[in-house]
Image: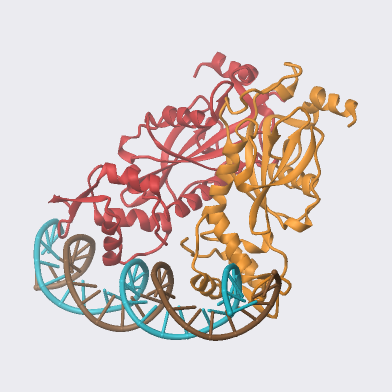
Chain colours: A red, B orange, C cyan, D brown
Amino acid sequence: MDSKLLKDFYNRGDLVFLSHVSVDCVIFGFHENQLKVLLLKWKDGPWCLPGGFVKHEESVDDSAVRILQERTGLDNIYLQQFHTFGDPKREKGKKSPDAKSWMSKRFISIGYYALVEFSKVNPQPDILSNECRWWDIDKVPTLIYDHKLIMDKALESLRLDLNDHPVGYNLLPTKFTMPELQRLYETILNADLDRRNFQKRMLALDILEKLKERKTGGAHKAPFLYRFDKKKYAEALKQGLKLGW
Amino acid sequence: MDSKLLKDFYNRGDLVFLSHVSVDCVIFGFHENQLKVLLLKWKDGPWCLPGGFVKHEESVDDSAVRILQERTGLDNIYLQQFHTFGDPKREKGKKSPDAKSWMSKRFISIGYYALVEFSKVNPQPDILSNECRWWDIDKVPTLIYDHKLIMDKALESLRLDLNDHPVGYNLLPTKFTMPELQRLYETILNADLDRRNFQKRMLALDILEKLKERKTGGAHKAPFLYRFDKKKYAEALKQGLKLGW
DNA sequence: GCAAAAGTGTTCTTCTTACACCCATGG
DNA sequence: CCATGGGTGTAAGAAGAACACTTTTGC
């Protein structure tokens, strides 16, 4: 890692970034019937959420997009701002290599969650970290500061958003099976759902297209493949659904 | 107004407050079957939302509470953070009496909405304004910056929150009639509801207590008075409801 | 006495839930 | 052949929507 770059970042970051304002992203993916989050590991230890700062002329939404882009390599990600964390004690144990550095000041953090297609992501550590990888949602290690709280709140928001928005398009591959979609909803909601009723509800939304193909290769009876009707899906996203989970 | 105070505020505000971070509050009240918002008028012209800044050692939530307290005289207000506004162009036309002042810098704003009991509020202008009063929600004047956007988003959030939270306790007097409660829901939702079905739904929530008294004095048949069962109401708030409006 | 608002119940429809049998596949 | 998961439909119950007549009051 370029240590001049790092030094500049600590010392002169405030020339580029707003002070006191940061962005944290909870990036959700879904793989092997598991909901996952993308985490970073700092060089000196703890795991944390991918985050960053807001450039002086940049909108906060754009900062989130940029951070997402840098960590995942993806553009055009489904992103939702869900809460802003403003407790002065939120960065408990914050290290200040130089107390005069803008970095050592108090930061409020604007939380975004992102839904991404697991297989398309190429996890990239940032300047402060040396590892970036997926963790099962229920196996995340201890996180720095209030990042566990942020993650929990993101999940809660996602759960609530499930009531009025469809969600699979951003988390699943283009073609997927009904049981896969169901697992996705079940993990997010942390609940078991009835197969038949789930299928009926999903099909009733009229945003799915049933393909003639089946997914072969697995054990057991081969399930049909579906894909989202992109147009109808976008419509449903905009209009809002009325699902009571 | 104390002009030294004002000068200090412009010049040295950053000793007290975080730079780049502000809080705006959309304060809703309900009176004479009208949903209202509390607005301030700046000394030099335009109307705006009550807002303020975050002290260095203060949580953002506490800033909102403090601002609410200062404008309405009320403690213990129902407050919800609903969105953070971070477009660098959001403060279009911002005046900078002194470009070096912290005040002239870019601010992101954390939006809160509050529900208050109209009759208990004693509107108080702040240091920058000379008027503070209620406006009908559909008659608000032109607002400064992006404050109209913030207000609209607050209303939209309130509308969505209606799906899982009861709302009357904070906006109505202790005793109120069913038609009043219905007007409240109708104004927030901007829709007409059926009297009989509305009553059935509300009573089914099991958070209302029907009193023997009626509200007299008005023209027409005297409606019964109700009040919220505080305990059950608090329970419903915490647990969340499942109303699909 | 009339206009305007409030009290009240029933029916129909829709949505939700619960539930069971057969089929395909891999081991 | 058997264990496991997937495909599919129906019936009962709950919730939501539609709807009308009578009562009270001020004017």
Tell which residue pokes out farthest to the top in this image. A4
Tell me: residue A72, above or below residue B241: above
Question: Residue B156: x percent and y percent?
Answer: 53, 48
What residue do we see at 53% from left, 60% from top? Answer: B164
Quarter where residue D25 is shown? bottom right
What residue do we see at 59% from left, 21% from top? Answer: A56
State which quarter of the image contains the N terminus of chain B. Answer: top right
Question: Which residue is nearer to you in this view: A22 or B226?
Answer: B226
What residue do we see at 29% from left, 66% from top? Answer: A197
Tell me: residue B138, above or below residue B85: below
Q: Is residue B238 visible?
A: no
Question: Residue A76: x percent and y percent?
Answer: 37, 32
Quarter where residue D1 is shown? bottom left
Q: Is residue A228 visible?
A: yes
Question: Residue B189: x percent and y percent?
Answer: 53, 55
What residue do we see at 27% from left, 50% from top? Answer: A207
User: In the figure, is residue D20 to the left or right of A182?
Assistant: right
Tell me: residue B102, above or below residue A240: above
Question: Which residue is nearer to you in this view: B85 or B198?
Answer: B198
Question: Residue B203: x percent and y percent?
Answer: 56, 75
Question: Which residue is nearer to you in this view: A206 or D20?
Answer: D20
